[in-house]
Amino acid sequence: MTTETTNRMDLTFRKLKEEGRTALIPFLTVGDPDLETTLAIIAELEAAGADILELGVPYSDPLADGPVIQRASSRALRGNIHLRTCMETALKARQAGSKLPFILFTYYNPVMQMGLDNFFSLLDAHEISGLIIPDLPVEESADMRERSRTAGVNLIPLVAPTSSERIARIVSGASGFVYCVSSLGVTGERSSFHTGVDEFIASVRQATDLPVAVGFGISTAEQVARFARICDGVVVGSAIVRKVEDVIPLLDNPATRSEGLLQIREFVAQLKP
Amino acid sequence: MIQVPDKNGRFGSFGGRFVPETLMNALIELEEAYNKFSADPAFQKEVDYLLKQYSGRETPLYYAERLSKHLGEAKIYLKREDLNHTGAHKINNAIGQGILAKLMGKTKVIAETGAGQHGVATATVAALLGMECKVFMGEEDTRRQALNVFRMKLLGAEVIPVTSGSRTLKDAGNEALRYWVSNVEDTFYVLGSAVGPHPYPMMVRNFQRIIGDETRRQILEAEGRLPDLLVAAVGGGSNAIGMFYPFMEDEQVGMIGVEAAGKGVDTPFHAATMSKGTQGVFQGSLSYLLQDEHGQVQEAHSISAGLDYPGVGPEHSYLKDVHRAQYVPVTDDEALEALKLLCVTEGIIPALESAHAIAHVTKLGPTLTKDDIVVICLSGRGDKDVESIMAYTEGAGK
């Protein structure tokens, strides 16, 4: 992270550090249940105190995701939501006044099919500050890293409790922040984390000067608070996507739509560390 | 031919390891263990012992005289992988990976299965080696292959019906990978085809190459020369790559992989990855893939559950692009006709998967001459399919 960075995510982490706060990073599946609602939910998340937002691109074969995000992906795909639509949604959210840094969470294949030249040429104009590509380990990411650097977009690396001696290699040359996977397994709420998760996060901290965030399975305010003590950011995904799923009947009915949105906002607000 | 795969698991530009970071250490550990043990004569001896005394290898290379005469002048041989214990070539790989799992100290194995053949093979080897076994199987396939589900349960395995996506082989593979991500520390994933992240495509090929190694020896014994053509069905492509690999340097030996055209390659209902697919990343490797313009993986369709898969092994994609092997589609109807033909000419009921390979040879029949020698990999027996064939011929099939 250079001092003259203009990357919105880097600026956010810098500000949070000055304030001594931990970033709350919610995840949403774009287009679940539809694009208009996604834009409305983004506004609610911002009002609830989100600091950075992960926008999940729906995918037919989401290997790293548990049942909650799989279902959200299926719902979004029925609405014909694709990588390009997700980028356009980020831009629309910005035009509607959102100040949040946006991270695009996408599997590699949709990016490959769009073509890397095309993909990278669109990111900046669509207000994307960072990328998470869960099925692109460091061995396969040389080209993407180089292109991200050139484009001024952070390619966020994931490290897992099983990464051990790989950690140094993964974080070297990374930008944005380092995403620690809290436990073995796919995304989804859980009551316990990998034994040794604290040592794991500490070892990541030692290996990098970048902000360190944790995600996968974090679903309650208690869990957020637990990790906020040792991390610069906490990602909450499935719990929010499940909340959206729960209130779809409310969102679908014009008479109760604002009640549905309010429930999402309140859920996220109480997570705030 | 250049040596493939390279150290990153690339066959030319295909293959690689496109998986969540959580799995990377496990894949590296697996690769190291495989490299270590496969160089150890004691490991090979144990595999060979079980292949011979337990599975009944070597399998015959049978001259199908009546089929040959029916089709024309060429001599057609069948490599009888259907005569293996559990009824298909899948056991070759399951024995290899099972012993590897044991040597790595893993006590639990998981597998994905489509037709159920690989699931049965893995359940069998798990029972033999005293390991706990879970098999992921698409719910749609558990219905199509109910007999194999019961077989796996008899063998002590737990069968987990997968209800996501198209509820077939691709989804079973996704779910097995997801389970493995969560249980990577004590579980070995016995992957059934030459697909997935490195080192699986290489490892499965090497465990299946016994098909081609035996065929080479047997045909030289029977005919005094190598065959002109090898034909094998390709879903993920493990029996085909096992048959092809030992002949790779023999330029006079042609190779044809036969994929499932379902209701036809011009309909939306096929599994013809090579004929209709484009390059993409799926289940951990870069290969040809049935997908839409946005990179969403499409559902495959075939009467054969074992070929009902939108991907294909990366080495096959490589062989296609360097023109070492050719890939052709065969429809459900053509496969069924071929199945019936083999039944009445030779008294052998082939698996629906293998029937695709036979069907292509029936099409080639008139173009072949009396000097041609063709070897078909009869990858499995058809007992498991009798019910779905009955349903299909009575018009109740899908």
Image: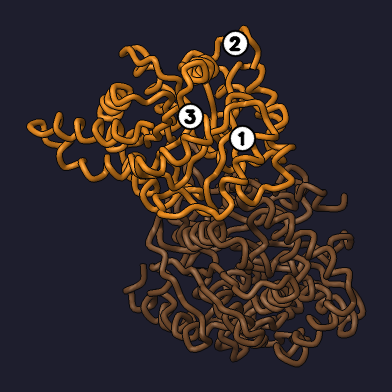
Q: Secondary structure at mark 2?
A: loop
- Please state if B373 lies on the left or on the right of A215 as rendered: right
Q: Which residue is mark 1?
A: A157
How far is mark 3 from mark 1, CA to CA?
A: 13 Å
Give the mark nearest the N terminus, 2 or 1. Answer: 2
Going by the numbered disc 1, the residue's amino acid type is Pro
Relative image position of residue A14 (x, y in whole percent) = 53, 16
Rendered view: A27 above or below B177? above
Place residue B215 in its image quadrant.
bottom right
Residue placed most toward the observer, B304 or B74:
B304
Q: Residue shown at 35%/31% (left/top)?
A: A272
Q: Residue shown at 64%/51% (left/top)?
A: A162
Relative image position of residue B39 (x, y in whole percent) = 88, 69
Q: Secondary structure at mark 1?
A: loop
Same subunit under labels 2 and 3?
Answer: yes
Whether residues under marks 2 and 3 lie with C-beta atoms below 8 angstroms apart, the answer is no
Q: Which residue is mark 3?
A: A104
Q: Which residue is mark 2?
A: A5
Chain A: its colour in the image is orange
In the rendered image, the quadrant that contains the C terminus of chain B is: bottom left
Chain B: its colour in the image is brown
Whether residues under marks 2 and 1 lie with C-beta atoms below 8 angstroms apart, the answer is no
